[in-house]
Amino acid sequence: MVDAQTISIVFAGLSIAASIVYYANVLRNADKARHRELIFQKYQSYSLEYTRTISEVMLMRDWKDYEEFEEKYGRESNLDATAKWLYIMRIYNLAGLYLKEGTDPNLIFELYPASAVINLWELFEPIIKVRREQSNEPQRYEPLELLYKEAKSRYPEIHPNRSWSEI
């Protein structure tokens, strides 16, 4: 005959096993939800306006140093260009945050082409570094930099400074 203590132990063990299965299922569903959210978010940005904006930002190549960049595209001289630059940088920085949080890099690079990430970072790295120093925020655009490093390690054949029309 089975005593009450044995039944109690069996039920406790079954409860723990059920909790583990439930928690694993919750984590898996949360990961799927995050992937769907990323896809939906990127899908919304595939607009004519987004396409025009990233093209304009990638064509901001006619500068030699930070001072010249600020003269042509800085907040004081060209608020529209600054807004576009910040918009694109934040979108790709967000993609880097998804990577940092553990989203599958293959999914990220399906939505954010590695060539765009590499070109964006290598074109504006000098600007980012100066802004990091000026703002005393060494972590500014750190997720984007992480995304860039992942793109470079996965796709070493991609070379920067190609024409934007080739991307």
Image: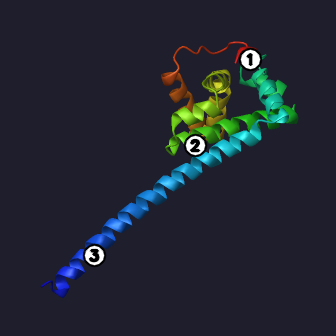
Disc nearer the start of the sequence (1/3)? 3
Disc nearer the start of the sequence (2/3)? 3
Compare residues 93 and 65 and report the one nearer the observer: 93
Residue at the image position 84 percent from the left and 33 percent from the top: 48
Q: Quadrant location of residue 164?
A: top right
- Note whether residue 76 is visible: no
Amino acid type for the residue under numbered disc 1: Trp
Label 1 secondary element: helix
Q: Quadrant location of residue 163?
A: top right
Q: Residues within 10 Å of mark 2 (few under 14, many from 20)?
A: some
Residue that numbered label 3 is attached to = 12
Image spot of residue 31 (x, y percent): 52, 50
Amino acid type for the residue under numbered disc 3: Ala
Compare residues 165 and 124 and report the one nearer the observer: 165
Disc nearer the start of the sequence (1/2)? 2
Give me the C-alpha separation between circle 1 and circle 3: 62 Å
Depth check, mark 1 against mark 3: the one in front is 3
Residue at the image position 37 percent from the left and 67 percent from the top: 19
- Note whether residue 30 is visible: yes
Q: Residues within 10 Å of mark 1 (few under 14, many from 20)?
A: some
Residue at the image position 76 percent from the left and 33 percent from the top: 85
Compare residues 60 and 99 and report the one nearer the observer: 99
Label 3 secondary element: helix
Amino acid type for the residue under numbered disc 2: Leu
Give me the C-alpha separation between circle 1 and circle 2: 25 Å
Depth check, mark 2 against mark 3: the one in front is 3
